[in-house]
Amino acid sequence: MKLRRANLYLGAFLLGAVAIGALLAPWLAHTDPVMDANLMNAENAPGREFWFGTDGQGRDIYSRVLYGARISLTVGVVSQLINSVIGVTLGVSSGYWGGWWDDWVNGLTNMMLAIPSLIFALAIMAILNPGLASLLIALGLTNWSYTCRISRASTLSLKNHAYVQAAKMLGYGDVRIMLTQILPNIVGPIIVIGTLGMGGAVLAEAALSFLGLGIRPPAPSWGSMLSNAREQITTAPWVAIAPGLAIFFTVLGLNLLGDGLRDLLDPQSKARV
Amino acid sequence: MTAYVLRRLWQMVPILLAVALLIFVIFSVVPGTFASATAADGRNVVDAQVLERMNREFGLNDPVHVRFGKYVAQLARFDLGISFRSREPVTVVLAQRLWPTLELTLAAMLLAVVLGVPLGFLAAMKSGGWVDTLSMVFAISGLSVPLFWLGLMLMYVFALILGWFPSFGYGGAKHLILPALALCVFPMALLARTTRAVVLEILHADFVRTARAKGMSEMRVVRWHLLRNAMVIVLTMAGLQFGSVIGQAVVIEKLFAWPGLGSLLVDSVSTRDIPVVQGCVLCIVIFFLFSNLLVDVLSARIDPRIKYT
């Protein structure tokens, strides 16, 4: 039990550190993340002046990693919010109304589950121009099926409860019942899935940017900072190390937080995956 | 069982059609065509005449419904169209890339099962001890690490510093090890956690207590009651992971210059070779659906309580 709480605190700590880094980036950073390129300083090893070393253009990696946190957190939070809104709207409404709408939503969910979400996001990026907005669309539209499944199942079991029936008697409209009677009762699992989904989104952004299909260099995204790392790894391995660790600790924080929240909100599930 | 498999195969048809429609819609809502898109990017400046000739060659001037009709008619004949880039039939291009991807994903899944299941099992049997803590820390780290970065680090250490394996490319078993190792980490971590949770649950089940009470040896309890019951859930989980492994394989293939579907997909996306992108996505979806079917059939073999009719 104590160990479980440790999950929550460690996750919150890691995520808090990343969030502070993102918010205070202009004050914490030593140089501008994009403009301060200086080829005289290219591929300097980590040291007193450049804490994490410099990249091939002589930019300070420490400063770029700080600014990268902004991109990663934005992508994680916004895309997962879009996913949650889509998933909850479809799930709750289909569970509540049933009928042909339920059939349609079910069909759509089955189809979404058949396409690996990274592949789907990649296909969407094929028609959009690389950049933050496109990434938010691509990742926000492709990862809602699980949220939808869970909210539909919970709604199905909740809608026959006495208090929901009572609200119906009182003449509440369908939408009002869904928002005030059902939604508050399923919000726990949705937050847990959302937190874990954010970790997935951060990883997906990094992967797409690494492939050159997400955030394009010179923008300081952790993924795009790694896109040249394979060519540089023999001469300057530190180029790859700091952004990779930044992704790792951010996602680890989100995963620990998600696990911790699940244990907190649902004590019955001992160690479900 | 045969009837069940046939019905499942039949059920795949609407999903595949829906996916085909979806991919088609995604690629036809954007205004412009392959040629104008590459021109607008500023990557290739295309002469208006060339553009017109390309549009005519690929039938891109037809209205959307005519193109969709043609597309479905082609699909029914297992024809996925012609690649914009290489002008080869997409099916031929895909066929060359199929085996390397299968090889990589299967090797990774195999590693994940072979390493992850015993790890989770050990953690559950020694629940609360240091083995448990350590393996669960390992598992959550495995779920958090960006695989392409892990691959890069493996490449750095084992290929560049130690020189044990080639750093990239396609070839024999030696070329397979590093990418498979990088790719197996995510499903391995998930399998370790699933196995641990499932085994812990079964350990407290009534039938295990009964078996122990009647004096059954621990070996037999584990073998007949624990493993058989845990196996089905673990197998299902492994099958469901197949999709995400194929997804992740895209990045790993690109990193290790592995000539599979994934690197083909990435190259086609960046050059907007739409027919190949469509073909790759369809191919991956078919992979995934078949792996799920296979898992369900295997589960029925292992667990006699599951009956499909």
Image (cartoon, coloured by chain):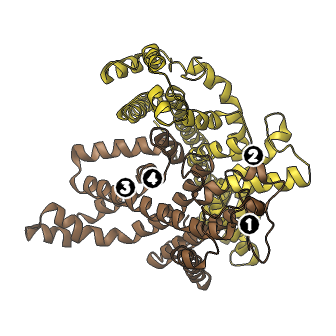
Chain colours: A brown, B yellow
Badge number at residue B179 = 2
Q: Chain of mark 2?
A: B
Q: Chain of mark 1?
A: B
Label 4 belongs to which residue?
Answer: A143
* Residue A245 screen position, x and y as percent: 68, 66
Badge number at residue A148 = 3
Quadrant of the frame with the C terminus of chain B: top left
On whether disc 4 and disc 3 are found on a single subunit, the reply is yes
Residue B196 visible here:
no
Q: Earlier in the sequence, mark 4 or mark 3?
A: 4
Label 1 belongs to which residue?
Answer: B122
Q: Nearer the viewer, residue A165 or A11?
A: A11
Give left or right: position of A144 versus B98.
Answer: left
Q: Marks 3 and 2, Cα distance to the nearest angstrom? A: 34 Å
In the image, what residue type sits under mark 4? Asn
Q: Chain of mark 4?
A: A
Give left or right: position of B141 versus B271.
Answer: right
Q: Marks 1 and 2, Cα distance to the nearest angstrom? A: 26 Å
Which of the two marks, 4 or 3, is nearer to us in this view? 4
Label 4: which secondary element: loop
Residue drawn at (85%, 56%), measured in percent from left and top?
B157
Residue drawn at (77%, 57%), measured in percent from left and top?
B153
Residue drawn at (70%, 63%), measured in percent from left and top?
B121
Q: Chain of mark 3?
A: A
Question: Is A41 situated above or below B9?
Answer: below
Q: Nearer the viewer, residue A200 or A207?
A: A207
Q: Marks 4 and 1, Cα distance to the nearest angstrom? A: 33 Å
Question: Is B165 situated above or below A70?
Answer: above
